[in-house]
Amino acid sequence: MQTRNALTHVDPELERLVQLEEARQFYTAKLIPSENYASLAVLQASGTVLTNKYSEGYARKRYYEGQQIIDQIEELAVSRAKAVFGAEHANVQPYSGSPANLAVYCGLISKTAENNRILGLGLPAGGHLTHGWKVSVTSRFFQAFQYGVDPTTHLLDYDAILTQAREVRPAVIVCGATAYPRIIDFARFAEIAKEVGALLVADMAHIAGLVAGGAHPSPVPYADAVTTTTHKTLRGPRGGMILCKSAHANVIDKAVFPGLQGGPHNHTTAGIAVALHEAASPEFRSYAHQIVANSRALAEALMHEGLELVTGGSDNHLILFNAAPLGATGKQAASAMDLAGLEANANTIPFDPRSPFDPSGVRIGTPALTSRGLKQAEMASVGRWIAQAIRGREDPAVLRRVAGEVYDLMAAFPAPGFEAPFPARPALLA
């Protein structure tokens, strides 16, 4: 409360905007699969005086004095990361997932090596920009190749990936996705990498919380290095983390610092430590499995409404659907949903005939709604509202009605990180 009072006194204009965002987050249905709600404990740890301290280097090996407490905080976060994920080594300093990926590539691929090829999942097939896509710096520093998905099922075709890996002979194979709704077979990827003499990097940014809670197979036993963000399904602050085999610890640590970054954000490290402590609890395990149950229920509800789902369903936290059966583009659908209190993002689908700026698909997920306590019964309502908003995208009365029903449901399931009194309810669409 003292912090809020100080902000009100020093910068009331910003305080007003923060309050508006609090109300928006509280009353809308957060369906973007890369977003979640951090707990109040994570928020408090992230907003401490730790932000005042510079700490270049690693614990017990700093370039600045006064690190007696900071070292203990970073060591605590590292030990918890290793315990939660069963990793040999952990680095909690990356500022986010993208620099974590770049650091791993820089660390694992020697600057003197003749083979600097990486093979990752293409962006249109559900991969991330930093898996070597052409507009990313990862395709400029390294010779990047992309594998895709089966043109009919839109599933990963591991035999086709093996064939391509034999042709490319990459130094690094990247597995993991940002828009793939099915289980990834990390053991199969490890076999492919071993056959072609490549190192395996797994990007589990989206599914880290599912892995921590035992709701998705872990890549840690199979990959040479694993990268992740610390928010999304893990429910921590906006940060990054790298887990790796001990054999790669030195080169990866040097790639993070001094290779790509300066001092770590100590307040974020503290928030990560709290999130990992929460992730080790039985309650978090139940939460992770509920995410998957909710995703499957929401997928069923959407298919009942006539929407076409990529791969025909979901095995994780994420759903990708084609809005065309309801006569809309992905952007039109996502914009209409937003006006109706349903927050999503337009997204390309595999073999999308439309532009990435106005694609055919919409990407949604269940992590945030699950954090609020919603279960399968509520997913039926959410699926119905999504279809109603898209069908009624040009009718303000429909969008107002849906938004009102969404606000009512969200008010009944208060979001983590919010303390009573809760924010005032936003006005409906004019």
Image (cartoon, rainbow, N blue to C red):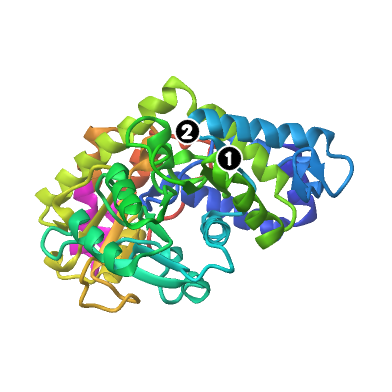
Front residue of this view, candidates 96 and 372: 96
What distance separates the C-alpha of mark 2 from that of mark 1?
10 Å
Residue 419 appears in the rendering: no
- The residue sitting at 83% across, 39% down in the picture is 67
Q: Mark 1 points at which residue?
A: 90
Identify the mark nearer the N-term, 2 or 1: 2
Q: What stretch is highlighted in magenta?
A: 383-403
Q: How many marks?
A: 2
Q: Position of residue 360 (x, y in %)?
A: 23, 70
User: Is residue 225 placed above or below 111 in the rendered structure?
Assistant: above
Q: Name the residue under label 2.
A: 85
- The residue sitting at 38% across, 56% down in the picture is 197
- The residue sitting at 36% across, 54% down in the picture is 175
Circle 2: element type? helix
* Whether label 2 touches label 1, CB < 8 Å: yes
Q: Position of residue 389 (x, y in %)?
A: 24, 59
